[in-house]
Image (spheres, rainbow, N blue to C red):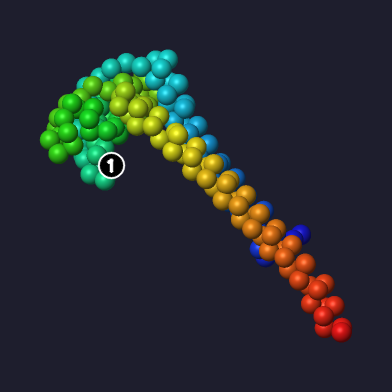
């Protein structure tokens, strides 16, 4: 069994690559859940009226509540879904949302889908940037090692004379 510190003795590019792979796994898990929800809504969506219950000013999103079969569910969407700018949305405003009757906790609006779809290119660029950074760091390390190897024989020859 390898000691716990063995990870830190790995080459730096392997640690960098592990970090990127971890990022990819997390993004896949998050995206997978969203893809599942999108699939369910595309197959079984029904409309209902929801009520705004809170506002998240950081990204101009609102939380809404809707009732299916006597059970309350909560969802989130951009405030533009209400047809009003964020500062004009009032708690208690109504909006139409779509939900999956087989999984009532899955809900959304076209604006929610648009917001998520616009995030995908950003995440792809983030991943490509991380891979590019690993590649650049690896090349820089290779140059430093090559320069160190070239200096080492020359400096030992000079010290012999």
Locate residue 118 relative to residue 136 in the image: left or right: left
Residue in view at x 53 percent, y 42 percent: 127
Image: 56 above or below 117: below
x and y, in percent, of residue 72 in the image: 27, 30
Q: Which of the pair 137/43 is nearer the observer?
A: 137
Q: Which residue is mark 1?
A: 59
* Numbered disc total: 1
Q: Is residue 83 visible?
A: yes
**In the rendering, at what x and y percent does residue 7 appear?**
67, 60
Residue in view at x 73 percent, y 68 percent = 148
Q: What residue is rendered at 74% in x and 62% in y?
A: 146
Q: Tag 1's secondary structure?
A: loop
| Mark 1 Cα shell of 10 Å, populated few (<14), some (14-19), many (≥20) | few
Residue 91 visible, this angle: no
* Residue 45, picture quadrant: top left
- Pick the residue in front: 29 or 131: 131
Relative height, residue 31 to residue 129 (above, below)? above
> Is 29 on the left-hand or right-hand side of 50?
right
Q: Quadrant of the N terminus?
A: bottom right
| Residue occupying the point 43% across, 21% down | 40
Image coordinates of residue 101 in percent, x first then y, are: 36, 18
> Could you say where residue 41 lies in the image, as x and y percent from the top left?
39, 20
Q: As displayed, is residue 124 above or below residue 147?
A: above
**Quarter assignment of residue 161:** bottom right
> In the figure, residue 78 lies in which quadrant?
top left
């Amino acid at each position: 069994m390898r000691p716990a510190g063995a990870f830190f003795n790995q080459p730096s590019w392997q640690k960098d690559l592990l970090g990127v792979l971890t990022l990819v796994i997390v993004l896949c898990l998050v995206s997978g859940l969203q893809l599942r929800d999108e699939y369910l809504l595309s197959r079984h969506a029904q409309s209902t009226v929801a009520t705004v219950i809170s506002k998240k000013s950081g990204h101009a999103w609102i939380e809404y509540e809707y009732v299916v079969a006597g059970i309350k569910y909560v969802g989130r969407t951009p405030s533009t879904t209400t047809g009003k700018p964020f500062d004009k949305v009032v708690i208690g405003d109504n909006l139409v949302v779509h939900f999956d009757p087989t999984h009532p906790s899955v809900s959304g609006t076209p604006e929610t889908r648009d917001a998520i779809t616009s995030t995908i290119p950003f995440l792809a660029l983030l991943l490509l940037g991380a891979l590019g950074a690993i590649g650049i760091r690896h090349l820089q390390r290779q140059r430093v090692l090559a320069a160190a190897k070239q200096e080492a024989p020359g400096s030992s020859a000079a010290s012999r004379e």
